[in-house]
Amino acid sequence: MEITRSANIHYLAPGLLGAPNVSVQGFTTRHEGVSRAPYNSLNLGANTFDPPHNVQGNRSLLARTFGGRVDKFVMVNQCHGTDILVIDEPNPDFAHFQKLGCDGIITNQPQVMIAVGVADCLPILLLDPVRRVIAALHAGWKGTAGNIAAKGVESLVTLFDSNRSDILAAFGPAIGPCCYEVDEPVKQAFNSSGIDWSKVAAVAGRGKWRLDLAAANREQLLAAGLSGAHIETAGQCVSCQHDWFFSYRRDGGETGRQAGFIMLKPLAG
């Protein structure tokens, strides 16, 4: 997955989800917005000290660049859990969703751009091009230990009658195992979830491990019935690439948020 450009936005375009007649999607970088340091410049996160008008301007820029509208741009108040908002009917006002405490969004509504903000955590996009339903999920270590990726798949299957063989997934940039050291409570949370710790973490010292969030969520999606050929991973570590991405851990907590975004196009005709 390489960084490309559409109008004023630098972003990563997942090739696996490339169904141009169905959806637009990608993972933003930190470039081409209006925010000033330390949020420079395309900060999409409202839970920062960046002035709200800057964040709203950046969200409007992102939506317009891909044919959307800012009044149909939906992010939620992420809280490192596993609750998922489902939007399955038209809505005259999407603003009230912004305050909901959850970590995923699913919709089958066209021209509603859904997104999750991240600054180390893993953004996950799901697409069922047959049933025309999409999801954006926020997977930090808590959400991953809570199996949010698998929960997203199960929601598509149970609520929208998706076939697991049709679901495509893309992982955006996140903090990599090169920079993500965790401790015993994280390991215990993963052990309680049923995830094989030995497959997703490497020993970094006594009581310390280097966690691979992408590998952990890939294991979840495979266990949930997705084909390995239907899972694409960006591979970039946000902590290593200061010029392109925000990183909460690297920047000491004062930083912006990039996003994973996806939007269904209207049906042709």
Image (spheres, grey):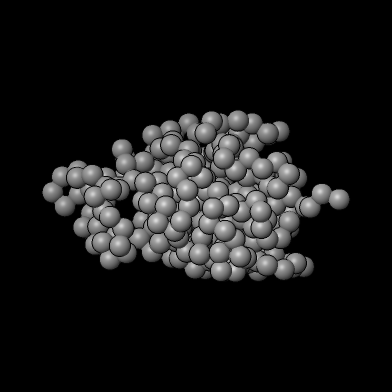
Horizontal side of 159 relative to 214 (left or right) equals right
Hey, which quadrant is residue 35 in on the image? top right
Which residue is more in the foreground, 242 or 83? 83
Asked whether residue 98 is in view, the answer is: no
Q: Which residue is drawn at 20% across and 49% down?
A: 208
In the rendered image, the vertical position of residue 25 relative to residue 194, given as above or below:
above
Where residue 266 sits: x, y (%)?
A: 78, 52
Asked whether residue 23 is in view, the answer is: yes
Q: Which residue is drawn at 75% across and 67% down?
A: 90
Horizontal side of 72 relative to 259 (left or right) equals right
Residue reaching furthest right? Answer: 269
Where residue 67 sits: x, y (%)?
A: 75, 45
Hey, which quadrant is residue 136 in on the image? bottom right
In the rendered image, the vertical position of residue 82 relative to residue 31, given as above or below:
below
Q: Which residue is drawn at 48% across and 52% down?
A: 226
In the rendered image, the vertical position of residue 73 relative to residue 31, given as above or below:
below
Where residue 171 sits: x, y (%)?
A: 48, 45
Which residue is more in the foreground, 85 or 15? 15
Count every numbered label the image shows and give the total.
0
Which residue is more in the foreground, 101 or 67? 67
Q: Residue at x 19, y 45 (%)?
A: 203
Residue reaching furthest left? Answer: 206
Horizontal side of 208 relative to 161 (left or right) equals left
